[in-house]
Image (cartoon, grey):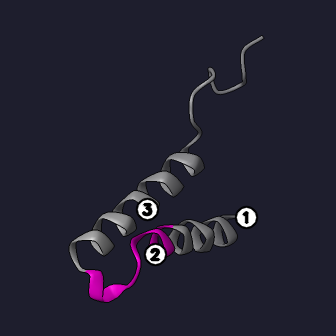
Amino acid sequence: MNNANGGGLDARTALLLLAGGIGTYIAFLHPAFGVAILVGISVMTTLHVLLK
């Protein structure tokens, strides 16, 4: 059986992954902004809560 969206990612999931990736990349380039994993997780968590 196929999902309603054709089995792919929905827009919300894609946005969360993209924002987390960008936040992590920026943290890797500029370590003064914090630990990269923490920044990525916090960005994704914040967007997840806001988009709920």
Seen in the image, is 22 located left or right of residue 17? left
The quadrant of the image that shows the N terminus is top right
Residue type, numbered disc 2: Val
Please report the residue visible at 49 percent of the width from the left and 52 percent of the height from the top: 17
Dividing the picture into quarters, in which one does residue 32 lie? bottom left
Q: Given this view, does label 1 or label 2 mark the residue nearer the observer?
A: 2
Q: Position of residue 16 (x, y in %)?
A: 53, 57
Q: Disc 1 or 3, which lies upstream in sequence?
A: 3
Q: Disc 1 or 2, which lies upstream in sequence?
A: 2
The quadrant of the image that shows the C terminus is bottom right
Dot 2: element: helix
Seen in the image, is 52 located left or right of residue 37? right
Q: Position of residue 48 (x, y in %)?
A: 64, 65
Label 1 sits on residue? 52
Q: Given this view, does label 1 or label 3 mark the residue nearer the observer?
A: 3
Label 2 sits on residue? 39
